[in-house]
Image (cartoon, rainbow, N blue to C red):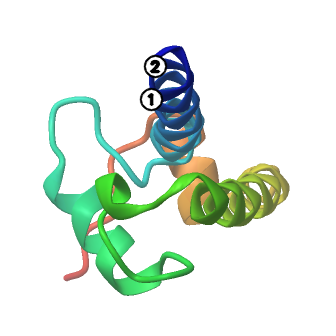
Amino acid sequence: MLNTYENLMNLRDKRSIVLTIATRTGIKEADCWIKFNNWMLNCSVLKKELHKYNSDELDKLIKQFRGLEANYRKSATKTGTKAWMHKNKFQPLSQN
């Protein structure tokens, strides 16, 4: 029973890491899951929903998100990039 509880807490902690990074990088909006869920289904390592990842798969996903965050930080230093605009809380430019 204790082992099951520890496994659940481990999964929760790993999912929390993914969600935190996703929020910091703009993949997940604070009040909307649609963008994040679409990203997970189309771009994540195993292309499935977050709750379907097991512990070993979450390690791979966390590695992907850490790389994504490093790229985001690097891109956020360049004026005019999408990451720079997100970091500085500018509205997206009009596509007209």
The residue pinned by badge 2 equals 5
Instruction: Name the element at disc 1.
Output: helix
- Point 49% across, 82% down: residue: 46
**Amino acid identity at mark 2:** Tyr
Task: Judge left or right: residue 38 versus residue 43.
Answer: left
- Point 50% across, 22% down: residue: 9
- Point 66% across, 60% down: residue: 56
Between residues 42 and 3, which one lies in front from this camera angle? 3
Judged from this view, the residue extending furthest toward the front is 1
Contact flag, marks 2 and 1 (Cβ < 8 Å): yes
**Amino acid identity at mark 1:** Leu
Quadrant holding the N terminus: top left
Q: From the top left corner, tell me how far across and down residue 83 is, in percent.
A: 60, 55
Q: Residue 54, labelled with which disc?
A: none
Q: From the top left corner, tell me how far across and down residue 71 is, in percent.
A: 78, 63
- 3D distance between C-alphas at marks 2 and 1: 5 Å
Quadrant holding the C terminus: bottom left
Q: Residues within 10 Å of mark 1 (few under 14, many from 20)?
A: few
Q: From the top left corner, tell me how far across and down residue 76 is, in percent.
A: 73, 51
The residue pinned by badge 1 equals 8
Rendered position, 55 above or below 63: above
- Point 31% across, 52% down: residue: 51
Rendered position, 60 above or below 76: below
Please count the marks in the image. 2
Task: Judge left or right: residue 26 versus residue 24.
Answer: left
Q: From the top left corner, tell me how far across and down residue 72 is, in percent.
A: 71, 56
Instruction: Name the element at disc 2.
Output: helix
Between residues 53 and 24, which one lies in front from this camera angle? 53
